[in-house]
Image (cartoon, rainbow, N blue to C red):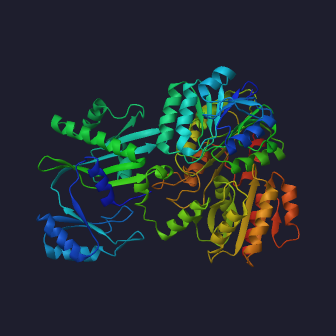
């Protein structure tokens, strides 16, 4: 789950991390008021959207007086940055940057742990740094049973600073950021750039935090910060009903039991010359209500011309699935051709139940895929 | 021989009195798995189909000499269950549960390592050595004893591949579902090594999907250490970037973890990649 920069900054502040106060404004007049409150000559105006590349898109601007402020805010509000419309800007004091650094905690699959990433190449696209000059990125795997003790925080800080006063200050920042990471079940907590100001202070100028969806159940306040796009609302709704859905755009809708099999089904449709409309994993249940809900969602996509149902019944019994499908389609009236593949436990009984219906039955996944593509033409 | 589980497996079921725990205990027992006990705090002294239930894993291990545990507890309690098993001396811990917070897995995995045990999962269907032992929820009827090792991140896609293997005459030595989470216990490398060293395995089917770079690392490992024939299928070529496709670990992040990259990594080292699951058996047969 993503949150906005200003929310990440607030979280950092609550953990005692050095981040300047900033204001969130939704219109020019609020921005002007914020500028007056800040009472500094130079401020930064930053678009607040759930994507990177804001600077490149013109969504981050400095303003040295009210005229520039009004201009920038007016330009940035309602700007479209990579498909996200800006409805909020952050107004904050501009900082005199002496040097920029990168620091983050991130879940690392390879080491199966949280990793502390540091670099003196701050304020840049870290993925580019990783590609071009990987030796400039330091990675320290954190033992979850030990955390970040003083010596480790210091060792990390010495990678960025030489002055012992700054080292100690940075070490404390790393420890506090780790606490935030673990306390909130983050999957990424990134400060880029962490800066050393001309005045010799260390500050976080930008922050990005993403959270582990699996842990949101134990962080209701964080879960409340979720601002889903229309697509994400659909996906969220599906999840709440017990299945996973991702919209794609083709005309062959699919409903499958199991995420891997669902991905393989989408791939197969494409392999045989069709276009999958969606990814839909209904999981292990043959319960008719779930099938009905899933079918409704699938058919709400007006592009869908054919539906392919691919079920491999393991624990789930094929005859249960067949009964569920029959009930579902007695409630949902549609003329769209439905291809059904049922294999596994009780497959004979399941297929027998569907004989003589309008469903197109297939025995193998390949057969089902080919049939669906044919019917979509 | 097979790997990890066989007739010497002595299994306890954590969460045996729950709905899933009870249901799958019954199935595993019917298959011939040696289920020696189960745990459910507060229900010690009861029994499930004659299998003794204990309050703690430590008690269960002492009383039954269990060496393996399968966990059927809800996600909020999974870390605790895994750590309890490790502390009690269980050597192979199989966690079926989906939805476990990643930092919980990080901690449990570290602790399990510390205790010299192995973890499979979480968010996995378990593993099976046909005609010897089944630990987890795999539908035993589709498996046949043979010599193809199977390693997969998936559940039903694994069954699809196994079904194809069985019907085309390629039985399985052991099939392991490593799980769909971003961080799991035993993964491709360790299992490839085990299969390479297993005299009962003569070929390996590897099923991967988008997300992470475990497949890329597996390709490198195979090129350096595996001489037995391997065939691969990678799911998710049609997955859009940035979207989680069901499994918590199945997500293309910042352009990394695409199916195309994984397929290219295997092809670059001469490991054939099936265009669809049903192609796996012929790819293996042609190299056996």
Q: Is residue A42 above or below residue A78?
A: above
Residue in front for this viewpoint, A164 or A93: A93
Task: Give B78 or A76, whichever is nearer the viewer.
Answer: B78
Which quadrant holds the N terminus of chain A? bottom left
In x, y percent, where is residue B164?
Answer: 78, 48
Res A196 seen here: yes
Image coordinates of residue A226 in percent, x first then y, are: 43, 61
Q: Is A81 left or right of B204, judged from the image as shown?
A: left
- Of residues B115 and B182, the one nearer the viewer is B115
Relative to A104, B80 lies left or right: right
Residue A208 falls in which quadrant of the image?
bottom left
Q: Residue A62's quadrant in the figure?
A: bottom left
Residue ID at (54%, 56%): B244
Q: Is residue B288 visible?
A: no
Left/right placement of residue B188 relative to residue A146 reads right
Judge by depth and name the residue closer to the eye, A105 or A266.
A105
In percent of width and height, residue A222 lies at: 40, 55
Which quadrant of the rendered structure holds the C terminus of chain A? bottom right
Q: Residue at x 73, y 70 (%)?
A: A373
Measured along the vertical axis of the image, is residue A128 above or below residue B227? below
Q: Position of residue A202 (x, y in %)?
A: 19, 47
């Amino acid at each position: 789950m993503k949150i906005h920069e200003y929310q990440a900054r607030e979280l950092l502040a609550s953990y005692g991390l050095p981040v300047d106060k900033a204001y969130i404004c939704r219109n020019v007049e609020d921005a002007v008021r914020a500028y007056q409150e800040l009472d500094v000559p130079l401020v930064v105006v930053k678009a607040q959207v759930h994507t990177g590349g804001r600077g490149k898109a013109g969504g981050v601007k400095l303003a040295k007086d009210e005229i520039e402020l009004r201009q920038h805010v007016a330009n940035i509000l309602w700007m479209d940055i990579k498909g996200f419309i800006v409805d909020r800007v952050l107004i904050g004091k501009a900082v005199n940057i002496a040097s920029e650094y990168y620091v983050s905690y991130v879940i690392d699959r390879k080491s199966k742990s949280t990793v502390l990433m540091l670099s003196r190449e701050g304020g840049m696209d870290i993925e580019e740094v990783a590609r071009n000059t990987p030796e400039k990125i330091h990675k320290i795997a954190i033992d979850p049973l030990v955390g970040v003790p003083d010596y480790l925080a210091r060792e990390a800080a010495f990678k960025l600073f030489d002055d012992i006063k700054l080292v100690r200050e940075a070490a404390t920042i790393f420890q506090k950021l780790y606490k935030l990471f673990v306390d909130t079940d983050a999957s990424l907590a990134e400060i880029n750039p962490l800066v050393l100001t001309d005045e010799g202070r260390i500050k976080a100028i930008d922050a990005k935090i993403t959270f582990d969806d699996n842990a949101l159940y134990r962080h209701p306040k964080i879960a409340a910060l979720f601002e889903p796009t229309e697509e994400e609302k659909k996906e969220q709704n599906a999840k709440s009903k017990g299945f996973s859905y991702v919209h794609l755009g083709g005309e062959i809708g699919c409903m499958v039991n199991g995420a891997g099999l669902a991905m393989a089904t989408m791939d197969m449709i494409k392999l045989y010359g069709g276009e999958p409309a969606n990814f839909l994993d209904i999981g292990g249940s043959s319960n008719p209500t779930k099938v009905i809900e899933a079918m409704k969602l699938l058919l709400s996509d007006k592009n869908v011309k054919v539906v392919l149902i691919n079920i491999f019944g393991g624990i789930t019994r094929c005859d249960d699935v067949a009964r569920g499908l029959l009930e579902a389609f007695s409630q949902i009236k549609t003329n769209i051709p439905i291809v059904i593949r049922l294999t596994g436990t009780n497959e004979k009984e399941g297929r027998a139940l569907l004989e003589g219906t309008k469903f197109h039955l297939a025995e193998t996944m390949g057969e089902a895929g080919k049939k669906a593509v044919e019917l979509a033409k | 021989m097979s790997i990890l589980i066989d007739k010497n497996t002595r299994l306890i079921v954590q969460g045996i009195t729950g709905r899933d725990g009870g249901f799958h205990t019954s199935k595993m027992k019917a298959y011939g798995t040696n289920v020696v006990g189960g745990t459910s705090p507060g229900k010690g002294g009861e029994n499930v189909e004659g299998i003794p239930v204990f309050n703690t894993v430590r008690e269960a291990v002492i009383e039954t000499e269990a060496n393996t545990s399968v966990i059927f507890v809800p996600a909020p309690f999974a870390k605790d269950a895994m750590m309890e098993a490790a502390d009690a001396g269980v050597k192979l811990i199989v966690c079926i549960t989906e939805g476990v917070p990643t930092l919980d897995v990080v901690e449990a995995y570290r602790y399990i390592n510390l205790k010299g045990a192995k973890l499979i999962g979480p968010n996995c269907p378990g593993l099976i050595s046909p005609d010897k032992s089944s630990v987890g929820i795999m539908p035993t009827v589709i498996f046949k004893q043979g010599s193809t090792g199977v390693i997969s991140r998936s559940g039903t896609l694994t069954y699809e591949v196994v079904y194809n293997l069985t019907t085309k005459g390629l039985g399985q030595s052991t099939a392991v579902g490593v799980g769909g989470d971003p961080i799991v216990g035993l993964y491709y490398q360790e299992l490839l090594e085990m299969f390479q060293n297993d005299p009962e395995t003569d070929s390996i089917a590897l099923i991967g999907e988008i997300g992470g770079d475990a497949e890329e690392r597996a390709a490198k490992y195979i090129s350096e250490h595996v001489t037995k024939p391997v065939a691969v299928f990678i799911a998710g070529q049609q997955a859009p970037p940035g979207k989680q496709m069901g499994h918590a670990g199945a997500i293309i992040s910042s352009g990394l973890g695409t199916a195309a990259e994984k397929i290219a990594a295997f092809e670059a080292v001469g490991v054939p990649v099936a265009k669809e699951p049903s192609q796996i058996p012929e790819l293996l047969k042609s190299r056996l």
